């Protein structure tokens, strides 16, 4: 007999396998991943999720409708009944305020910084890789308001 989490994980894989393509601009009311079988969008459960576009063939970038949170789904994704399903979350980034694609590009380019230690250099490098992924998708998108 399978546990409830294994049954739910199997259902998520089936949804991802049977779903059509998710296009930039598609919106969703929440997220469930096979990675942790939970709805990720805390502390903002009322935010809609919007697809920004592909980072690569196996990674898709999303944002909340206010542009504060950006995250990617890796390995597979799909939708059912307005919910977004994914195999696992790749990057997660909180800009700590509302953004538009234009302000995201400006902030990512302005985020070049310095560091004083090895740990600081590693943190800076990881942050830059995340911002580079976000900016690569956002530069391909037309300037729109955060709620479009």
Image (spheres, rainbow, N blue to C red):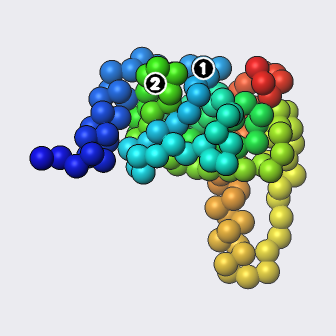
x then y, percent, for residue 15: 35, 27
For label 1, the crowd category at 10 Å Cα-Cα, with few meaning under 14, some 14 to 19 and many 20 or more, is few
Q: Nearer the viewer, residue 97 or 142?
A: 97
x then y, percent, for residue 116: 79, 80
Residue at numbered disc 2: 79
Q: Nearer the viewer, residue 112 or 8?
A: 8
Residue shown at the point (81%, 22%) measured from the top left = 144
Quadrant housing residue 24:
top right
Q: Nearer the viewer, residue 84 or 135?
A: 84
Residue shown at the point (76%, 36%) measured from the top left = 67
Q: Is residue 31 visible?
A: yes
Residue shown at the point (72%, 66%) measured from the top left = 124
Residue at numbered disc 1: 26
x then y, percent, for residue 129: 65, 54
The earlier-in-sequence mark between 2 and 1 is: 1
Q: Is residue 74 visible?
A: no
Q: The C terminus lies in which quarter of the figure?
A: top right
- Which numbered disc covers residue 144? none
Residue shown at the point (17%, 46%) measured from the top left = 2
Name the outermost residue toward the left: 1
Secondary structure under badge 2?
strand
Quadrant housing residue 20:
top left
């Amino acid at each position: 007999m399978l546990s409830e989490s294994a049954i739910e994980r199997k259902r998520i894989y089936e949804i991802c396998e049977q779903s059509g393509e998710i296009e930039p601009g598609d919106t969703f009311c929440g997220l469930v991943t096979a990675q942790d079988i939970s709805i990720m969008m805390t502390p903002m459960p009322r935010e809609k999720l919007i697809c920004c576009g592909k980072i690569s063939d196996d990674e898709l970038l999303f944002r909340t409708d206010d542009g504060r949170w950006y995250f990617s789904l890796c390995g597979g994704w799909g939708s059912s009944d307005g919910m977004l399903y994914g195999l696992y979350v790749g990057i997660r980034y909180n800009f700590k305020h509302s953004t538009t694609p234009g302000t995201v590009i400006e902030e990512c380019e302005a985020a070049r910084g310095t560091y004083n230690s090895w740990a600081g250099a590693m943190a800076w490098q990881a942050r830059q890789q995340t911002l580079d992924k976000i900016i690569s998708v956002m530069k391909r998108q037309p300037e729109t308001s955060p709620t479009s």
